[in-house]
Image (tube, rainbow, N blue to C red):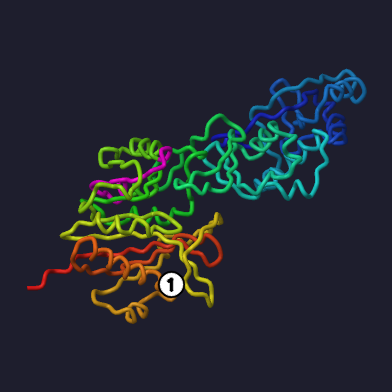
Amino acid sequence: MEGTGGKPTAVVAVVTEPRFTQQYREYLEKQKLLDRQHRVKKLRDGTVALPVLREALLEQHLQELRNRVAPGSTCVLTQLLDPVPSKKAQSYSPAQRLCLEVSRWVEGRGVTWSAELEADLPRSWQRHGDLLLLSEDCFQAKQWRHLEPELWETVASALGVQRLAKRGRVSPDSTRTPAVRMLLGNHGWVEHVDNGIRYKFDVTQCMFSFGNITEKLRVASLPCAGEVLVDLYAGIGYFTLPFLVHAEAAFVHACEWNPHAVVALRNNLELNGVADRCQIHFGDNRKLKLSNVADRVNLGLIPSSEEGWPIACRLLKQDAGGILHIHQNVESFPGKTLQPPGSSEIEEHWPSPQQIISNQLKNGATSDSRRKTLSVATKPEWQRWAEAAETRIATLLHQVHGKPWKTQILHIQPVKSYAPHVDHIVLDLECRPCPLVG
């Protein structure tokens, strides 16, 4: 069993002389007290330590070992701080190990183990250092409530962590606050490292999506040296930080209205040494006073960032324009017309950035010629949505700036799938003012 930082957690063992080891083992096995996940260990003084299940071991068992099983034997308890896993335990998956330890602990508390309880155990989770974040669909049976809070110590020990939290559905508020409850531990602050960038945040107040890693890597590789960016939905810095740390943007205006995310964002900018190249704009980005400043605007909100499109058009530099990175969930149901995208909590990762679909288009290409240049892997629903978005953005640019602009689809990037036929994609749209005629 491993704890924080990969160090084994301590286990309880019964210590006796070598000549009594077999008698002790037979008794402990018969009483279902022997811990089969750890090896018997010979101690420096020559005695032998047999790992046991501490929850089920009673004083009466020790007395029986001393008085009936092996009269005259040394029979004391100790803690093995560096227990060696048995060969069988080493072959267990984390889910199997969890089931084994929890079922033994539950039976030791006098509760009958059942198929219902086993089916209610988690099969997957998010790990953030020494904190494990469980999904909402586990530990729902009423029997668990009578076993708290010690239950969570057993779960944490089985999975090698110190803290546990359980998430519910994302709150339908404007800040998408995660409904996360701490089960074990006194705070939810964690640190996660992606591509050399440190993110610190409170899991009870801010969301973190592992599925966005391909887009964060792609953003980090963009040629942004000398550019000014606006990140309209910055969160804790998912894309703000890659733009600053790896893409070498000159400056980023980061907009966020979740106060907890703003605290994390400010800390993360300091942690990564880029705070001097970023200004945080706290509050509703629809009230943002900036305009005519951006070479790029990132619109990283799903299921749709459409509400931010007029703001993004206003932010682009009037004389030179720039590039919009527009996130969207797009439905692709066979035989169904394109609908406003929805959202789900199921995440399926797309391939690495090296396998992404790129769609480089020449100036002046028609809609028909664009379709012909698409990769065969690109879904037609993505292209139809991208073309509709391009038309809408061109109209907004004309309205905002009072003159026509050229727009061009540069790239369609799949990020992940939220559910069957619902894909999170990013459209890179180039926007340039048309030269004045005459």
- 122 to the left or right of 172: right
Residue lying furthest left: 438
360 in relation to 6, above or below: below
- Residue 257 appears at what percent x and percent y? 38, 43
Is residue 343 rendered magenta in the image? Answer: no
Q: Which residue is mark 1?
A: 378
Is residue 255 rendered magenta in the image? Answer: yes
Kindly identify the residue that appears in the image at 48 percent across and 61 percent down. Answer: 350
For label 1, the SS is: loop
Relative depth, front residue between 113 and 16:
113
Point out the stretch of residues depicted in magenta: 243-261
- 308 to the left or right of 421: left
Relative depth, front residue between 106 and 203:
203
Q: Residues within 10 Å of mark 1 (few under 14, many from 20)?
A: some
At label 1, the amino acid type is: Thr
Residue lying furthest right: 68
Quadrant showing the C terminus = bottom left
Relative depth, front residue between 375 and 196:
375
Give the quarter of the image for residue 147.
top right
- Residue 312 appears at what percent x and percent y? 29, 56
